[in-house]
Image: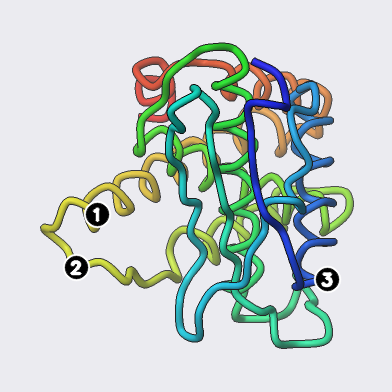
Amino acid sequence: MTESLLRGNGAGLLRERALATAIQGGLERLYQLDRVADVDAFVEPAAEGEREALRVRMAEDGAVEMSLRLPILGRAEFDVGADADLDPLCQIIEGVSHFVYLAHRARSDRGTTQLELELQAEVDKYVVIAAALGRIDEKKSETLRGRLYDEVSFTSAEGTELGERYRMANRLAARYVWRLERAYVRRGRIPELHRELRRFYHLGQEDKLRLAA
């Protein structure tokens, strides 16, 4: 699949688009992915009160049409080490994670599922914010893990399809990150941590779920 088979219509949101571009570059470097398309060309403003959403459809000619709706950050800057509310930033990370994952899978002619997308996005939140904190150590990682996976609320009710999918992705990502801390972060084995994250990224859903659980 080539970039010509991905279409978007980006406008506005200069700050959010710049952040999305930086996140895309970081994920592609870590996971060793070739660029399929620039995410900033696909970004659209979310409606007031609307959360991040990646909209996807297959055109008649086989092109994958996508638009990434992002909310306004609102604040001038974020201190990822101190701010209690990381939700606006996490929404952008999640949207870019979905975009990169789908674009890469489409290019490789591989399918994916919504649970797989959500699980990878939950891991990517940790990856991106941990990188922004500088050299990660066990204490920083434990604090971040708690903020991302324990101190959370869900917009979809428990027992609903969406609610259960988000809760499962959250639980599995928390377990996986905990394992990363014990095996790599605690011992300062950062190059090996990066190799493990790359391995996880390229697995299919069944293997991802087995490894995380």
Residue 36 lies left or right of residue 143; in this view the side is right
Reading the image, the residue beneath label 3 is 14
Q: Position of residue 169 (x, y in %)?
A: 37, 44
- In the picture, the quarter occupied by the C terminus is top left
Q: What amino acid type should be assigned to the residue bearing mark 2?
A: Ala
Q: Position of residue 63 (x, y in %)?
A: 54, 28
Tell me if label 1 and label 3 are in contact, CB under 8 Å: no
Q: Residue at x 42, y 29 (%)?
A: 212
Reading the image, the residue beneath label 1 is 162
Q: For the residue labelled by badge 1, is the local secondary structure a helix, a strand or a loop?
A: helix
Q: Residue at x 48, y 59 (%)?
A: 53
Closer to us: 187 or 71:
71
Q: For the residue labelled by badge 2, is the local secondary structure a helix, a strand or a loop?
A: loop
Closer to us: 138 or 66:
66
Residue 43 position by quadrant: bottom right
Of mark 2 and mark 3, the one earlier in the sequence is 3
Reading the image, the residue beneath label 2 is 157
The numbered disc on residue 2 is: none
